[in-house]
Image: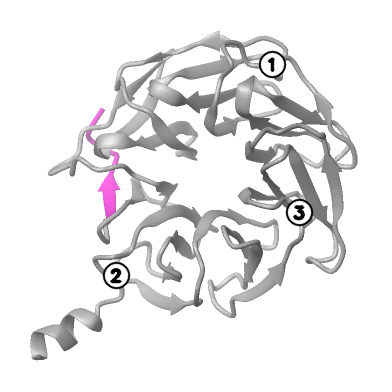
């Protein structure tokens, strides 16, 4: 029984499935499928467990004031302070199934999901502006690049762009091949990358007007894209951590990789290291200084 008690006292449990990770420079937050948020205030050395109830956090974003927002599969948005505490839920009506969340530089909250729906709030969830494109299409990723420019991508190569901070959205050139986006990352208003099924990687240098295939030497689907020390990184299936080197995505070797999908990854501020997470309570810090 002492062993059972010791296991239950651990902050990360074996049934935890890490689905998203974000950091604000001081605090790391992991969203799980198991109804908890995991918080580290010492760059991933130790973790605190915050139970939220019947919750599945599928995406997390950091706002300009360093606070966190996370989207719950069960149609709620969660808001936490800059220390990763005081989690509060906000019910949302649209989209019916939320899939991704973002903060605008002005502090607005944005949610995308099923039925090609984009919802934005400028008053922390009190009221919402909903853009419904009237299509049976999932929007799977959204990012605000600056105060004016934002991008969102969805099924069948759907590409959306806003030039007025989300007040309006217009269709951009579709990503070819009925592309299904897993994740997107824009380095600036012009250059960005989108990952998709079967390890597909697409790259644009002109704000999405044209897209080119990019080599993915990992030959693995990449589930999350993020910047680390000024370089695009990714985590994917089979325990793969990847980095953009030249015009190709290549494996970042690290000790004892586990053959399971990685659902989240984030840069650790001020260190040559990232934190990655997946199923089975997998949560690891990986050094990136000497593994090129």
Q: Nearer the viewer, mark 3 or mark 2?
A: 3
Q: Secondary structure at mark 1?
A: loop
Distance from disc 1 to disc 3, alpha carbons, whole Å, reads 24 Å
Indicate the position of residue 28 as horizontal and vertical percent values: 45, 62
Q: 200 left or right of 179?
A: left
Instruction: Tell me the CA gap for discs 1 and 2.
Output: 41 Å
Q: Nearer the viewer, mark 1 or mark 2?
A: 1
- The quadrant holding residue 39 is bottom left
For the residue labelled by badge 2, is the local secondary structure a helix, a strand or a loop? loop
Residue tagged 2: 12
- Residue 103 at x, y percent in the picture: 70, 52
Per the image, the residue denoted by label 3 is 94
Range of magenta residues: 284-292
Quadrant that contains the N terminus = bottom left
Residue found at x 53% / y 17%:
202
* Label 2: how many Cα within 10 Å (few below 14, some 14–19, many 20+): many
Colour scheme of the picture: one colour
- Which quadrant of the rendered structure holds the C terminus? top left
Q: Residue at x 14, y 42 (%)?
A: 255
Q: Residue 291 in magenta?
A: yes
Residue nearer the viewer, 62 or 239: 239
Query: According to the image, label 1 marks what residue?
Result: 174
Across and down, in percent, residue 117 comes to 76, 42
Q: Residue furthest bottom?
A: 1
Q: Could you tell me which residue is drawn at 76 percent across and 54 percent down?
A: 94
Query: Which is nearer the N-term, disc 1 or disc 3?
Result: 3
Horizontal and vertical percent for residue 285?
28, 53
Q: Nearer the viewer, residue 246 or 87?
A: 87
Q: Is residue 32 visible?
A: yes
The residue drawn where x is 34% and y is 30% is: 242
Q: Crowding near pointer 1: few (<14 within 10 Å), some, many (20+)?
A: many
């Amino acid at each position: 029984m002492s062993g059972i008690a010791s296991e239950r006292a651990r902050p990360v449990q074996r049934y935890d499935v890490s689905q998203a990770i974000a950091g604000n420079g001081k605090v790391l937050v992991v969203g799980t499928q198991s109804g908890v948020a995991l918080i580290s205030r010492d760059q991933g050395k130790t973790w605190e467990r915050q139970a939220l109830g019947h919750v599945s956090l599928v995406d997390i974003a950091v706002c300009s004031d360093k606070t966190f927002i996370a989207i719950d599969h069960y149609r709620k948005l969660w808001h936490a302070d800059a220390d990763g505490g005081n989690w509060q839920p906000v019910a949302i009506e649209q989209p019916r199934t939320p899939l991704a969340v973002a903060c605008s530089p002005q502090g607005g909250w944005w949610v995308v999901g099923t039925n090609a729906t984009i919802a934005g709030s400028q008053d922390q969830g009190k009221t919402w502006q909903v853009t419904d494109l009237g299509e049976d299409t999932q929007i799977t990723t959204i990012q605000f690049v600056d105060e004016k420019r934002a991008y969102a991508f969805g099924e069948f190569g759907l590409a959306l762009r806003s030039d007025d901070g989300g007040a309006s959205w217009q269709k951009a050139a579709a990503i070819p091949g009925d592309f299904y986006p897993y994740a997107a990352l824009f380095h600036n208003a012009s250059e960005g990358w989108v990952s998709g099924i079967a390890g597909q990687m697409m790259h644009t240098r002109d704000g999405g007007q044209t897209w080119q295939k990019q080599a993915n030497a990992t030959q693995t689907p990449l589930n999350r894209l993020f910047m680390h020390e000024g370089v695009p990184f990714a985590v994917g299936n089979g325990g793969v951590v990847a980095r953009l080197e030249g015009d190709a995505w290549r494996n970042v070797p690290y000790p004892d990789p586990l053959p399971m999908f990685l659902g989240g990854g984030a840069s650790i501020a001020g260190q040559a290291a990232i934190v990655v997470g997946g199923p089975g309570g997998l949560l690891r810090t990986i050094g990136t200084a000497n593994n090129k």
